Image: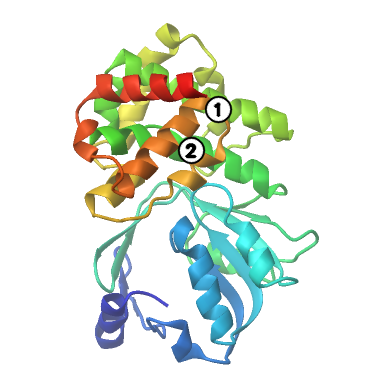
Amino acid sequence: MSRESHCEAIRHGGLRVIGEEQRWRPECVPTAGELSRRSFDWLILTVKAFQVEAALEQIRAAGLELGHVLTIQNGLGTEEPVERIFPGTPLFSGTPTLAVAQSEPGQVEPANKGGLALAPVTPGALWGGLADGLGRGGVRVRLYPDYRAMKWSKLLLNMVCNASCALLDMLPGEVVADRRLYALEVQAVREALAAVREEGRTLVDLPDYPVRRFATAVRLPVWLSRPLLGRRIARARGTKPPSLLLDIRNGRQQSEIRYINGAVPGPVNQGLTELLDSVVAGRERWDRFRGQPEALLEALQTARGKN
């Protein structure tokens, strides 16, 4: 299933993967109702985190029979709706470090760096050949035993220069160039590291991303880590806007912030969550923070004082 424009392009010209000569011709429909009462070995959910529950309800209403479910979203908390709506269905979790761009309907372009991290959520659940099939299709797959450790590890990457960039309408390089904003990013990640320790998880490295080394660097004094880590963050992100900034620029009225920063207890992350939620919902003017680091820092300080 995909958007109507994407399905229309696939029906007429197939799915083109940049870098491959072959065009794929999968069946593509825009709604679950068009697949009513059919059976599928796998449901792979790639919608935004805030769209998961509605997508699952559509699938249940269509009477689809599912052999397995794989969730692939940013942040924490998208597995629980699957367990509630499709109880007993073997559930797996995935987190991508491979970026895939859709330059136009019917055309996708995977990056050369990264892969797909996978872990079972249902104890004892078997992959049934999916991981091997993805590998044969050219996706670098790495399997993990603890899905929470895997998801927390990706969350650290997702949260860096994401909420702050969205509020400020700035790129990561601009954020880390300001020592106050860089210190804010470090505080947010340290809150996440504390939550990981509290939950008793051990961070893991993800395909092409040494998460544990990043966590070690974040624990260093800010004055020591900023010259190296700030430069790496700016270079890695380049001129591509982070996901939360893209959503707000595109006028989305929902955000994944509650699954990213909102999943982390701590004053910085909860403050960023409340502020961005207010902007996205229209309760707060975006212009209050756009290009205004002082306004953001003051608002976070005020929120911390209230708590």
Q: Mark 2 or mark 1, which has the lower sequence index?
A: 2
Structure colour scheme: rainbow
Residue at the image position 52 percent from the left and 24 percent from the top:
307
Mark 2–mark 1 distance (CA, rounded to whole Å): 9 Å
Q: Judging from the image, what secondary structure is the residue with disc 1 in?
A: loop
Residue at the image position 43 percent from the left and 49 percent from the top:
256
Can you say whether 16 is above or below 46 in the image? Answer: below
Classify residue 104 by image quadrant: bottom left
- Residue bearing the label numbered 2: 261
Q: Is residue 287 left or right of residue 303?
A: left
Can you say whether 42 is above or below 91 in the image? Answer: below
Q: Is residue 199 left or right of residue 54?
A: right
Q: Judging from the image, what secondary structure is the residue with disc 2 in?
A: helix
Residue 286 drawn at (x, y percent): 23, 39
Residue at the image position 54 percent from the left and 16 percent from the top:
219
- Residue bearing the label numbered 1: 266
